[in-house]
Image (cartoon, rainbow, N blue to C red):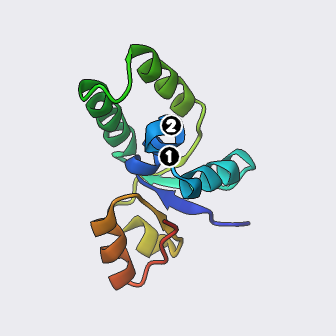
Amino acid sequence: MNAGFVADASVAAAWVVESQSTEATDRLFVEVEAGAPVQVPVLWMFEVANALRTLRRRRRIDQQGYAVARAGLGRLRPFIDTEGPQLALRKTVPLATRDSALNKAARRAGVRTLL
């Protein structure tokens, strides 16, 4: 079975908020919809909630967009890893993040990145 990939909150926000999406995040979402497994760290739900609140506070999304984003994320069923940090490294799966510093650190650690 395909181990899928690890997704962080920045990618989740891109999946449900159009202004945050790119062609690459859209491709990953198509994979997820087709059944590719997504693994996330235990704090992922809180990080995503914070990202959406930040977008709302900065008026990047309105109240309706916020509600639609939350509903969209509620339909996702990621595998929540509770074993601790270094998820992509430990699981030997690629990392999907829009955070350039995290991408750089992952590559230095030998983790393949998707964005």
Disc on res. 41: none
Asked if residue 13 is positioned above or below residue 30 in the image, the reply reads above
Instruction: Name the residue furthest top.
Output: 64
- The residue under label 2 is 18
Is disc 2 surrounded by few (<14), some (14 to 19) or many (20+) residues within 10 Å?
some
Asked if residue 15 is positioned above or below residue 95 in the image, the reply reads above
Residue at the spot 51% in from the left edge and 35% down from the top edge: 16
Residue at the spot 52% in from the left edge and 33% down from the top edge: 73
Relative image position of residue 107 (x, y in whole percent):
39, 80
Disc on res. 21: 1
Q: CA distance from mark 1 to mark 2?
A: 5 Å
Relative image position of residue 27 (x, y in whole percent):
64, 55
Of 71 and 46, nearer the camera is: 71
Residue type, label 1: Ser
Relative image position of residue 78 (x, y in whole percent):
55, 46
* Tag 2 secondary structure: helix
Asked if residue 41 is positioned above or below residue 59 in the image, the reply reads below
Is disc 1 surrounded by few (<14), some (14 to 19) or many (20+) residues within 10 Å?
some
Q: Is residue 11 left or right of residue 104?
A: right
* Tag 1 secondary structure: loop
Q: Is residue 24 left or right of residue 101?
A: right
Q: Quadrant of the N terminus?
A: bottom right
Of 19 and 68, nearer the camera is: 19
Disc 1 vs disc 2: Cβ atoms closer than 8 Å? yes
Residue type, label 2: Glu
How many labels sit on residues?
2
Relative image position of residue 93 (x, y in whole percent):
54, 71
Residue at the spot 42% in from the left edge and 75% down from the top edge: 89
Q: Is residue 17 left or right of residue 47?
A: right
Q: Is residue 26 left or right of residue 46?
A: right
